[in-house]
Image: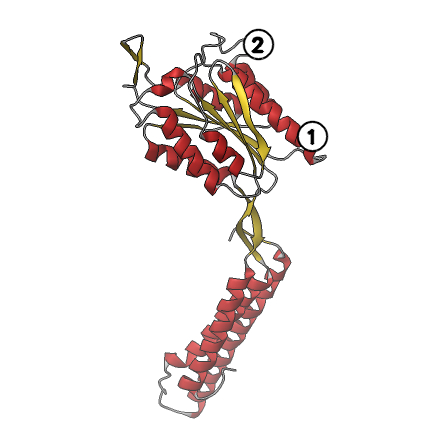
Amino acid sequence: MYGFQRPAMLLFGLIPLVLLALYVLVQARRRRRLHRYTEAVVPQSWWRHIPIAVSLLCLVLLTIALATPTNDMRIPRNRAVVMLVIDMSNSMRATDVPPNRLKAAEEAASQFTSQLTPGINLGLVGFAGTPYLLVPPTPQHQATLEALKKLDFADSTATGEAIFTALHAIEATAIAGGDTPPPARIVLLSDGGENKPSDPQDPHDGAYTAARLAKDQGVPISTIAFGTKGGEIEMKGQRVAVPVSTDQMKTIARLSGGQFYTATNIGELNKTYNSIENDIGYRTVPGPGGAGWLRLGVITALIATALALLINRRLPT
């Protein structure tokens, strides 16, 4: 509970206070009257005050219910757009995450897709030296599941172009969807920095340029740096080190207003996707929370009645 929809109703909370004051006044007058007509002090059991105390508590609970307290409610984002952007560069061949980075990423993305809120428009971009819009945003998530099975390796890493491709797909969905653009998010998974172009600040295709544009369009990028420092691949008969790089991914997330994650195995990647799904699959809004307080008030009233019959053999007055 963190607020009230009808706070003016809390003024009814004065009633229990007034009744409590009257009860105390009546009991004081009663004690004086008894003392006036009897020489000995008659002991009074404090148990007889319990029914009225519980009755006043009932009134407090019912007053809170009348004021309609609010609590957090999670509402599915049925019109939201999520673009999965997955690195397919040759460094994703590394087997530090078995069977290899790309296969592990495919498995985790498939699980994420299966669990995503059904009404969300989900799309997929695969990229290496060239980005490919494999699935435009659609609520038919089966299309993404099928496309994930076809990811394959290629040379280079054009992260900026991949982000631009995802932004164009989101823009096309917004135009087709109506006057107000839907909330959107890009989920970018990669194991290294961009090398096409070599400068991420490139004004045309740079990853940082794309991240700033995403920020301007209100599309945060959740980045996942996937892999370990000990990753290696075989090229032309030689072992080549391909350690995971986090610097660019962290900067892309910061520039776009998104969040940065790291994952070194399939379990961590699944947890990361679950965290992202909880964030983008639902929105939190204030909702009415008075029903519980009303039930508590009714239960307390029944308890007060039972105590009155049990202790005083009459209803509290």
- 240 lies above or below 171: above
Q: What residue do we see at 60% from left, 34% from top?
A: 183
Q: Secondary structure at mark 2?
A: loop
Dot 1 or dot 2: first in sequence order is: 1
Residue 245 visible at all: no
Q: Position of residue 8 (x, y in %)?
A: 64, 58
Q: Which of 123 and 81 lies nearest the eye of the viewer?
A: 123
**Crowdedness near tag 2: few (<14), some (14–19) or many (≥20) residues, C-alpha within 10 Å:** few
Which residue is denoted by mark 2 in the rendering?
203
- Residue 127 in percent (x, y) is at 48, 19
Q: Judge whether residue 128 can be spotted in this image.
A: yes
**Gap in angstroms between the C-alphas marked 1 and 2:** 26 Å
The local secondary structure at tag 1 comes to: helix
Q: Which residue is mark 1?
A: 175
Residue extending furthest toward the right: 179
Q: Which mark is residue 299?
A: none
Q: Position of residue 178 (x, y in %)?
A: 71, 35
Residue found at x 41% / y 30% = 106
What number of labels is visible?
Answer: 2
> In this orientation, which residue lies closer to the viewer: 264 or 214?
264
Q: Of residues 13 and 236, which is closer to you in this image?
A: 236
Looking at the image, residue 57 lies above or below residue 263: below
Mark 1 neighbour class, 10 Å CA radius: few under 14, some 14 to 19, many 20 or more: few
x and y percentages locating residue 194 in the rendered image: 45, 13
Q: Residue at x 58, y 10 (%)?
A: 204
Amino acid type at image mark 1: Ile
Q: How is the image coloured?
A: secondary structure
Mark 2 belongs to which amino acid?
A: Pro
Q: Residue at x 27, y 9 (%)?
A: 238
Which of discs 1 and 2 lies nearer the camera? The answer is 1
